[in-house]
Amino acid sequence: MTYFKACGALRAQMVVDDDARLPDEFLAPVFWQQYYSGEIKGDCEISEAPSPFAQWVRSRLRKGVSSQDSVDVLEVGCGNGRDTLLFAQRGFTVVATDKCPKAVEITSRKLPPGSAARVADAHSLPEIAVDYAFARFALHTITEDAQTKLFQWVKKNVRKPFYGETRSVNDPRCGRVKKVGENEYVDTHYRRFLSRAHLERAVSQACMHMEHCTEESSASGITSRDNLGEILPGVASVD
């Protein structure tokens, strides 16, 4: 299953600038290295508390029997490990991944024995058997090509639901900064805003189906200062 959420009427698409293109540095983890090192500030302060979405997901996870060749949860885009730690403290074996080495370093220091964090992006996720996959606020930081790779990996490696939460095209930030592609923008870093129709189509093309998808301004109906703008969380299942 893949779980997703979002809010409001769809925003009209903007016209892409003829000369707009995405500089390579916006896809590299430079911004996130500086952000997690405390050198620059992002949209909000870094929180140590688990996100409301992770708490909602945690209530739905069921621990199976892990072997040396499998893990309970793989997290895509772990950031500072705030959600990774929640799963690990509840007894789940977790592999946390992030393309930002500083984020992986921070997360690694928090994890108990048996769980681990490693540097990886959507193109280099570990080829291991996974019960659940979790990606909070990661899909909108990667290109559509990377998203395709991620969904292909989910189809191949994940045995149970894939839970995700991302910013939608109704997020107030959509359209406010330089446009470099369809619903793609850059300011300090890259963002790609998703519509429900786009997400459902991408999930279907990966031979999965959307189990649940809603759109609202806070994850799982819980108001949080963390959830800036509209978000699109959901659940997809392998067919």
Image (tube, rainbow, N blue to C red):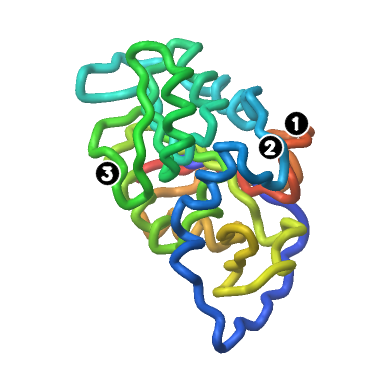
Q: Secondary structure at mark 1?
A: loop
Closer to the N terminus: mark 2 or mark 3?
3
> Residue 203: percent from the left, percent from the top?
44, 54
Kindly indicate whether the residue at mark 1 contacts the one at mark 2 (C-beta within 8 angstroms).
Answer: yes
The residue type indicated by label 2 comes to Ala
Mark 2 → mark 3, Cα distance in angstroms: 27 Å
Q: Secondary structure at mark 2?
A: helix
Seen as rendered, the residue at the extreme bottom is 18
The residue type indicated by label 1 comes to Ile
Mark 2 → mark 1, Cα distance in angstroms: 6 Å
Label 3: which residue? 156
| Residue found at x 50% / y 47% | 210
The residue type indicated by label 3 comes to Lys
Judge left or right: residue 1 versus residue 122. Answer: right
* Residue 222, numbered circle: 1
Q: Is residue 235 visible?
A: no
Seen as rendered, the residue at the extreme left is 69
| Residue found at x 57% / y 26% | 82
| Residue found at x 48% / y 35% | 103
> Residue 60: percent from the left, percent from the top?
53, 23
The quadrant in which residue 113 appears is: top left
* Residue 219, numbered circle: 2
Judge left or right: residue 105 versus residue 154. Answer: right
Q: Quadrant of the C terminus?
A: top left
Q: Is residue 125 above or below residue 68?
A: below
Closer-to-camera residue (132/149):
149
Mark 1 → mark 3, Cα distance in angstroms: 32 Å
Kindly indicate whether the residue at mark 3 contacts the one at mark 2 (C-beta within 8 angstroms).
Answer: no
> Residue 107: percent from the left, percent from the top?
47, 26
Closer-to-camera residue (79/122):
79
